[in-house]
Amino acid sequence: MDLPEVRGSLGESRSAVSAVWIVPPDPVAWLVVAHGAGAGMDHPFIVGFCRAMAEHGVATARFNFFYMNSGRRSPDPEPYLRAAWMEAFGAVMGMAEGIPALAGGKSLGGRIASMCVADGMPARGLVFLGYPLHSPAKPERVRSEHLARIDVPMLFLHGTRDPFAKPEPLAKVLEQLGTRATLVAIEGGDHSFNVRGVKADAREIGAGLAEHAGPFVRRVVGAA
């Protein structure tokens, strides 16, 4: 399905974020996707994922945080990251015209989405493309308290070699979340889902994750 990408902005005036959306015919849901800390919305991984989601009837809107548009390498303070998420999600809800909207993203983008949902952003579900549960150097310091306040379904897509979510602490968090959380483990994958000995470009890797995320989104909105 070779659908056009529409470039524009989401949100109001000076607070708007730059974005790209892809809308298949008669979408069953929208998924708003935020990038990770070091790469913007046009990174091949994010592009491949979003384009592949259209094959499952899911419209996507991916956006840049403010710091990425400014050409800075360091992420904005948390309040600015949250503000960007709220601008993007609110605008997509208006575009969706009643179609269910979910949220998620790569690493930092997914984590900020979860914090917004924990504090009331009305996403129907969350899709995490590698959730940064802890720093690689301090796996004992798990950042998961707010996840307990989320009552919508969550999909955790994780590489088994991801240094930001080692198997033991991840398993404990998932156990606490119970049936709200679904884990899909990518055997041998790192934080970018690269697998040793397997040649694949980032766009192909992102598209492969849509094979799991697409059915999840459809189940959440009752379109499976």
Image: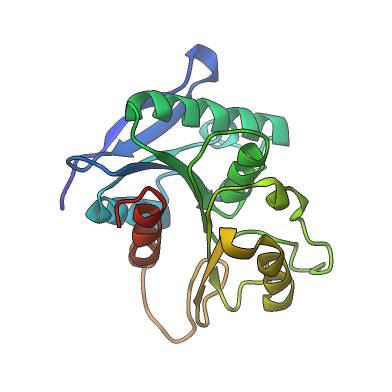
Q: Is residue 77 visible?
A: no
Percent position (x, y) of residue 103? Answer: 49, 44
Residue drawn at the location 58% of the way across and 33% of the way down: 121
* Of residues 208 and 14, the one drawn nearer to the viewer in this rendering: 208
Residue drawn at the location 68% of the way across and 73% of the way down: 171
Residue drawn at the location 36% of the way across and 68% of the way down: 201
The residue sitting at the bottom extreme is 197
Q: Quadrant of the C terminus?
A: bottom left
Residue drawn at the location 58% of the way across and 78% of the way down: 160
* Of residues 186 and 63, the one drawn nearer to the viewer in this rendering: 186
Percent position (x, y) of residue 202? Answer: 40, 64
Please determine whether, in this image, residue 67 is positioned above or below residue 209. Answer: above
The residue sitting at the top extreme is 13
Please determine whether, in this image, residue 6 is positioned above or below residue 40. Answer: above
So how many labels did they put on this image? 0
Please determine whether, in this image, residue 132 is positioned above or below residue 93. Answer: below
Percent position (x, y) of residue 96? Answer: 34, 30
Position of 65 with respect to 27 (left or right) is right
Q: Is residue 197 visible?
A: yes
Structure colour scheme:
rainbow
Position of 195 with respect to 94 (left or right) is right
Percent position (x, y) of residue 93? Answer: 41, 28
